[in-house]
Amino acid sequence: MELCTYKINIRGTVQGVGFRPFVYALSQRYLVTGTVSNNSKGVEIILNTDTLTLKQFLIALEYEYPLLATVDSIQHCEVDYLHFDSFDIIQTQDSDQITANIPPDVSICQECENELFNPQNRRFGYPFITCTHCGVRYSIIYDLPYDREKTSMKFFVMCKLCEEEYNNPLDRRYHAQPIGCHDCGPKLQLLDNKAKEVKTLTNEIDTTVALLDEGKIIALKGVGGYHLVCDATNKSAINELRKRKRRPTKPFAVMVRDISMAKELAFISTKEEELLVSKERPIVIVQMKDKSSDEIAPGISKIGLFLPYTPLHLLLLDNLNYPLVATSANVTDEPICTNLASLEKLQNVYDYVLNHNRDIVNGCDDSVLMVVKEQQVMLRRARGYAPVCIELPFALKEKVLALGANQKSTIAIGFENQVILSPHIGDLDSISSLEYYEKNIDSLERIYKFSPEVIAYDMHPKYESTKIANKIMQKHTSIVAKVVQHHHAHILAVMAEKKMTSKVFGVAFDGTGYGDDGMLWGGEFLVCDCEDYERVASIEYFKLLGGAKAIKEPKRVALSLLFSLYDKAVFSLVNPTIKEFSTLELHTYYTAWEKGLNAPLSSSIGRVFDSVASLLGVCQVMSFEGESGMLLEELFDSSVTGAYTFSYENSKIDILPMFDALLGEKDISIAVSKFFHTLVEIIAVVYKPYNLPLVLSGGVFQNRVLLDLVLERFPKAIISNVIPPNDGGISLGQVMATMNMSRDK
Ligand code: ZN
Ligand code: ZN
Ligand code: FE
């Protein structure tokens, strides 16, 4: 058959995942000549072959590509004839706009795990064993294209054996950038909390195991940062960690040795098991079996479990008979610690550090997921999933930088039909988190050689992200601004993930977000498309006594609602909320409420949850975000039916009648259950006249019970699965809002 030359372009996550050696192996199988290389858009193959072999080659590409790759498209065309004597992997070429994806960090693969525990293997017990199919990527990358010289592995010189593997296209470690071994790669180091090296008896792992057995708290260097770990069955160790970290009640995540240990602790569905053992190895929130010990998650029957994802974790847990509490090492409100210098602030929290000398370039928390009605719900999108490229259903006219919100912030850059979404950055409440946030912007811009033409940001004038937007625009006056309403962005994030562009009916149940009337929205019903929204209904405003303080203190919101209901009669009421205030305070707050002093208006469903929790005596002051909702979940009784009344007139939903009825309820569980049903009923009543897809978003939909009930009632309702429903999705929604923006207009 006649030989022709073909060019094949593959786009997707195809770099740093063993794609070129895979193509090389195919060339040997089909006896073809040509080249394969990485370029700024993905992988390019030049092939001399006949049409029949080309067909087979393309099928093999499509169905056999490496585990870690994701393929968005494979395109081929015939080009002018070129002659080749062999098939070669040729060097990466640099070019302008990078559009290839940064590969995320994934867990150790089965083959490496087998070698890790095989005494005959030269990497037996090596805590950094890796290959092209597994291990760190994003967290060690300074720049694209993904080559060893552009990662923190550049400081390690390969030994002869490693180099041979690295250069052999038929080896599993061909161009595995983090390759190393006992002789040449990163090494462990055990330090005390003064950063002094500790002498070990046998090795660092054995000594660490002995320390954990004694109940010590260890800072353990992982992939995207340090964890604080201790024996999860040792109550006094956990209480000590809570005390030292000043974290009285917020649940801890727990790392288990394997899936069978997970099943001893919790009920795990097939879908949850799939996620736990997946190559991303997220934390999955599951139902605990035994609630007799309350240290890990006080008052809460759910537990966040995850499996070891690095060889180091495997070596540790293989030597332990118990699971480990493993929580991100960070100061409250600050980003995860990624080096010894930042970890120093926690030296009163940990006793020892199990450290190593491979630098973490890009910090990245653990991802957190749950499963509701067989659907994956992302709660924190980070390690394993981020950064990831989301394909839009249209091409952007301009290059967009979206700055997200102020809590659980993420940033996104958009160009052509792609959006690159950063991992979870965190709340912008401290100087170091702001620095970390700006570093993330710089990294994405540098790695993608990207400079924005449009900046999309939240409407809230006081968000740190808004201030940064203004700062950037002052420096670059040609950049166009796009202000996006918070809840519009929430709905748009789901639309982006689901590739929807026509009108939807969006329900945004949220903590807070700045409304276009300057009020704090959060119980919104929006009919919207990418460009615009109409607020067709919302929760009737109530007053947040004490402004920002009301967000942490459910009792303040509850008191305000009591004033709305009963006015001065509140003074003679007896209930759990009133008990929290002195007579003097009641009178002071009444005046503040009546005159609207430091009492901004809000329609937030998040605050409605808080007030229910306060009125029923479940939670008066929260020690972590979302606590009231989690505690209410615990009280839900699925056998209770029926909802409370509310009124819906002139686009306003008045929920005071619900509170009035709720206060008369004798059984807390019945009250809580009927409250959940009332929220579902509100959605049903408002949505009824609209013949549009129903889209749900906003932080309140992280509530498992509410989401489950709404999906039960509306099985076709659309939620996001890869983007969090909380503010972590806002930046993606903001990019979506710039669909038709063009500077020429
Ligand atoms: Zn591997
Ligand atoms: Zn080596
Ligand atoms: Fe929000």
Image (cartoon, rainbow, N blue to C red):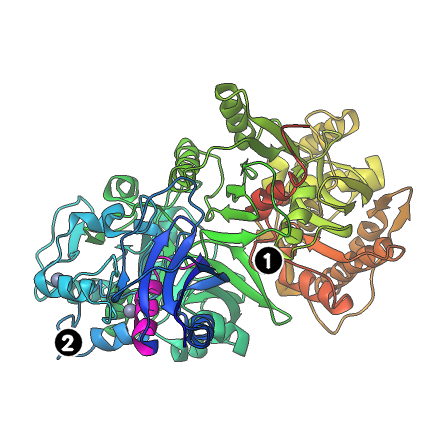
Residue 360 is a magenta residue:
no
- Residue 328 appears in the picture as rendered: yes
Image quadrant where residue 713 sits:
bottom right
Q: Which residues are magenta?
A: 13-29
Judge whether residue 459 can be spotted in this image.
no
Identify the amino acid type marked 1.
Answer: Met
As drawn, the label of residue 630 is: 1
Q: Is residue 466 above or below residue 186?
A: above
User: Which one is in front, 417 or 655?
Assistant: 417
Task: Tell me which residue sits at (35%, 64%) in the image.
Answer: 19
| Distance from mark 2 CB to nearest ligand 1 atom below 8 Å | no
Residue 708 x/y as whole percent: 68, 66
Q: Earlier in the sequence, mark 2 or mark 1?
A: 2
Q: Is residue 56 left or right of residue 372?
A: left
Marks 1 and 2: in contact by CB < 8 Å?
no
Q: How many marks?
A: 2
Work out which quarter of the rendered image holds the C terminus and state it.
top right
Q: Secondary structure at mark 1?
A: helix
Q: At x 33% / y 69%, what residue is drawn?
A: 22
Is 638 displayed left or right of 465 in the figure?
A: right
Mark 2 and mark 1: Cα distance apart in space: 48 Å
Give the crowd class for mark 2: few <14, some 14-19, many >=20 residues within 10 Å: few
Of the four image quadrants, the one with ligand 3 is top right
- If the image is split into quadrants, where does the N terminus sit? bottom left
Indicate the position of residue 294 as horizontal and vertical percent values: 46, 64
Left or right position of 382 against 114: right
Looking at the image, residue 111 sits to the left or right of residue 521; the answer is: left
User: What residue do we see at 61% from left, 46% from top?
Assistant: 395
Element at badge 2? loop
The residue indicated by pointer 2 is: 121
Residue 386, labelled with which disc? Answer: none
